[in-house]
Image: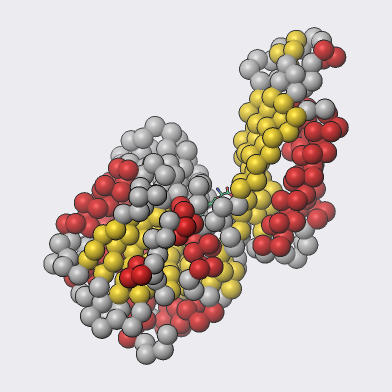
């Protein structure tokens, strides 16, 4: 049974692109992945489901002479973004889009899996199709459900994320920290609604929330070591119904980011203190939730990353670059705390658009080089005598 051709990869990617689903709701995506995997008809392949996280999918390939189990993880969820690409294969799910390129990630994973379903690997391979990367920390949920135990325990774990700023097909990573750790901010300020003409009879939640927005900007400016950096972004602000009614409540969502866990904890503490201060100053009630879940900093493990960089640098058909760390988050950071391994970027050549853009249009020319780089690396890794 042959591995997937470039046109088959493109067909798969376009199908996945049309059926994006939000975190923990990836039922159609999971069914399609299983359909493609079952069609491989591979006798050394086993599929496992995780009842506690029903949209997760684990696939194990039995090795011929295994000395270890090598894990490869891809995320499968999408974002609440309304697609604006105008592509003929654009999202068919209103308000949901693969705006972070997880359709590309899944397709590369299927390409690698299909190769080792046609050429039995020497070591065992574990493919993890992970729900809920953008929110709800699916990697940690599946780990906590005990899915990575016994024969399903990887000795090392690898994964990729696409990067529109890099040329299509380029692989890029670094030793040490690749991505930030993050914490979601969810906060509601509750005051008292009333007539716009009588502010003295009401308590304006928008004014309190606006003060919060401005004050948290001081965290990066005044509390974080400027050499290390950090991010506090509030991405939503919902309040009020009409211009002549004072809003009784305001809800905001955002994210805290830094490369060190100690900085993240300090920033969480500052957000908490500022929210409490705003509550006291403006006499509003504050309901604050800070959720880190599994979004730990993504730390590439020294031994595996050195081997990977050596391979990618020397492989004649791999375009490889060393890159600085980025403030993107990834719950693969949690899995890399449990199992040593490496995350890389895969360039998808769309520099006009960032990840999470409604117009993101990754170049499909990245698919085959992505598959080949991983097949080459995993094959070399399985031939190596050292662990
Ligand atoms: C690669 C990527 O874009 N990941 C997301 C992860 C989000 C984590 C969490 N929901 C948060 O918002 O902090 C990212 O936004 O970086």
Height in image: 362 above or below 197? below
Q: How many marks?
A: 0
Q: Where, by quadrant of the figure, is residue 229 drawn?
A: bottom right
Residue for point 22% across, 54% down: 36
Q: Is residue 93 left or right of residue 161?
A: left
Q: Where, by quadrant of the figure, is residue 257 drawn?
A: bottom right
The quadrant the C terminus occupies is bottom left
Height in image: 311 above or below 329? below
Height in image: 223 above or below 94? below
Residue for point 40% across, 55% down: 130
User: At which x and y percent is residue 75?
Assistant: 41, 55
Report the colour scheme: secondary structure
Q: Is residue 90 left or right of residue 84?
A: left
Residue for point 69% across, 57% down: 264
Nearer to the camera, 379 or 285: 285
User: At which x and y percent is residue 226?
Assistant: 77, 61
Outermost residue on the bottom side: it is 385
Q: Is residue 194 left or right of residue 343?
A: right
Nearer to the camera, 43 or 20: 43
Height in image: 194 above or below 191? above
User: At which x and y percent is residue 104?
Assistant: 37, 55
Examine the rendering and report whether any part of residue 87 can be seen: no
Examine the rendering and report whether any part of residue 62 can be seen: yes
Nearer to the camera, 383 or 14: 383
The quadrant the N terminus occupies is bottom left
User: At which x and y percent is residue 96?
Assistant: 42, 38
Residue for point 72% across, 26% down: 190
């Amino acid at each position: 049974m042959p591995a997937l051709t470039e046109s088959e990869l493109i067909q798969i990617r376009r199908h996945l692109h049309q059926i994006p689903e939000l975190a923990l709701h990836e039922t159609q995506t999971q069914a399609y992945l299983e359909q493609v995997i079952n069609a491989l008809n591979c006798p050394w392949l086993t599929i496992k489901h995780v009842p506690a996280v029903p949209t997760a999918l684990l696939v194990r390939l039995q090795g011929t002479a295994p000395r270890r189990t090598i894990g490869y993880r891809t995320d499968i969820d999408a974002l609440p973004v309304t697609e604006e690409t105008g592509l003929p294969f654009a999202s068919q799910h209103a308000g949901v889009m693969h705006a972070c390129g997880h359709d590309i990630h899944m397709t590369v994973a299927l390409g690698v899996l299909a190769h080792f379903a046609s050429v039995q690997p020497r070591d065992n391979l574990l493919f993890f199709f992970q729900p809920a990367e953008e929110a709800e920390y699916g990697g940690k949920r599946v780990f906590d459900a005990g899915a990575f135990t016994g024969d399903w325990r990887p000795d090392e774990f690898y994964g990729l994320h696409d990067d529109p700023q890099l040329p299509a097909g380029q692989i890029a990573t670094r030793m040490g920290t690749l991505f930030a750790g993050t914490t979601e901010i969810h906060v509601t300020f509750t005051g008292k609604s009333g007539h716009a003409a009588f502010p003295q009879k009401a308590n304006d939640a928008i004014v309190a929330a606006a003060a919060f927005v401005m004050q948290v900007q001081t965290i990066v400016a005044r509390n974080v070591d400027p050499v290390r950096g950090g991010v506090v972004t509030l991405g939503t602000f919902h309040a009020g119904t009409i211009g002549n009614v004072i809003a009784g409540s305001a809800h905001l969502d955002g994210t805290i980011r830094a490369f060190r866990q100690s900085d993240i904890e300090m920033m969480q503490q500052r957000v908490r203190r500022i929210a409490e201060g705003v509550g006291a100053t403006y006499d509003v009630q504050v309901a604050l939730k800070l959720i880190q879940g599994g979004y730990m900093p993504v730390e590439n493990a020294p031994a595996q990353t050195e081997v990977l960089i050596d391979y990618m640098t020397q492989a004649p058909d791999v375009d490889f670059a060393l890159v600085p760390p980025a403030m993107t988050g990834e719950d693969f950071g949690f899995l890399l705390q449990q199992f040593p391994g490496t995350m890389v970027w895969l360039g998808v050549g769309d520099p006009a658009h960032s990840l999470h853009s409604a117009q993101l249009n990754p170049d499909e020319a990245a698919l085959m080089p992505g598959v080949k780089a991983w097949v080459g690396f995993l094959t070399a890794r399985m031939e190596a005598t050292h662990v």
